Image: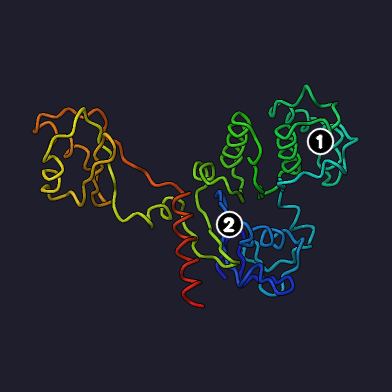
Amino acid sequence: MDTHLIQTAGLSKRFGTQQAVDALSLTIDKGEIYGFLGPNGAGKTTTLRMILGLTKPDSGEIYYHGNLVNGTDPSYRANIGVVPEKHPSGMWKWMTAVEYLQLFGNLFDVTASTQKINSMLDHLDLRAHKNKPICKFSRGMMQKLSFARALIHDPEILLLDEPISGLDPFGIHQMRDLIIEQHRKGKTIIVSSHLLSEVEKFCTRIGIIHQGKMITENATNKIIDSIIPTKNFRIEIDSISDGLIGKFLELPFILDAKIDASAIVVSVEKEGDYRKAISSFLYDNGISPLLIQEQVKTLEEAFLSITSIQANTHEEAK
């Protein structure tokens, strides 16, 4: 067994006739931000619950630092801090922010917990609300408080389930900064999210599951690159003369060229940067480009492409 921070091997779980997770194997290495993605019902939550020891797998193993673990082992679970999608505020609604954090500080036997709590509340801009009942917290405030609770015992791993769902733009920016900050401090972070445009901004590696199976797992940029056969540049100019597309297609490095509204989109091989050559061609033809911009594929496009291919393959196999 290779030594990864967390590794699952053949993890499976069925609920009645529904195969929620099907022989799932994933690897999460120390110090990375791992994005765990998949459409609704793909098996993400069930997988995370098995990793946390909240759901017992029907088969398969979970390894931590290369050692087979029992998910209910307190010493294992103490190494994970969790920010759930839905906060159990109803259970603690009578508590203030300080009381809420102190409860978990006591549960984890945190030393100097009072100083640590005050420092965290300051850092998260919650100091002014420290004595407010958490039932009166907004979604964004509760998200930050939950983040503080997940960090109170200084775990090695942070597991974030939809960490920016429901937040306003300012809250999303704050949460993104918190995630990046903890990554820089050496935390290993697992992010389950459907907001792919955000996941792309900070995840170093991702795994995509579909119908309980892992369909791809790789560095984020490699997954995006895997669905891009060419590199495209959008060229904006004042006017497109007759014959310009034909001249572009005569260039040896141009694979395709077409008009898109008031711009020209050219395709070249992925390797190499052809902007200088494109600029030289335009100036040689007396054209001053207003903009030459690479059209970058997003993780969302990769996700939709990969899951669409998987769904079509599944239908063809029936």
Where does residue 165 sit, x and y in percent of width and height? 64, 41
Please indicate whether residue 181 sits to the left or right of residue 139 in the image.
left
Question: Could you classify mark 2 by the number of other residues whose Cα lies within 10 Å: few (under 14), some (14-19), or many (20 or more)?
Answer: some
The quadrant where residue 293 appears: top left
Question: Could you classify mark 1 by the number of other residues whose Cα lies within 10 Å: few (under 14), some (14-19), or many (20 or more)?
Answer: some
Q: Secondary structure at mark 1?
A: helix
Residue at the spot 24% in from the left edge and 41% down from the top edge:
259
Where does residue 307 sit, x and y in percent of width and height? 49, 60
Residue type marked 2: Pro
Q: Which numbered dot is residue 39?
A: 2
Residue at the spot 62% in from the left edge and 36% down from the top edge:
175
Disc nearer the start of the sequence (1/2): 2
Q: Is residue 241 above or below residue 48?
A: above
Q: Which numbered dot is residue 58?
A: none
Q: Which residue is mark 1?
A: 113
Foreground pick, 95 / 249: 249
Where does residue 317 sit, x and y in percent of width and height? 48, 77
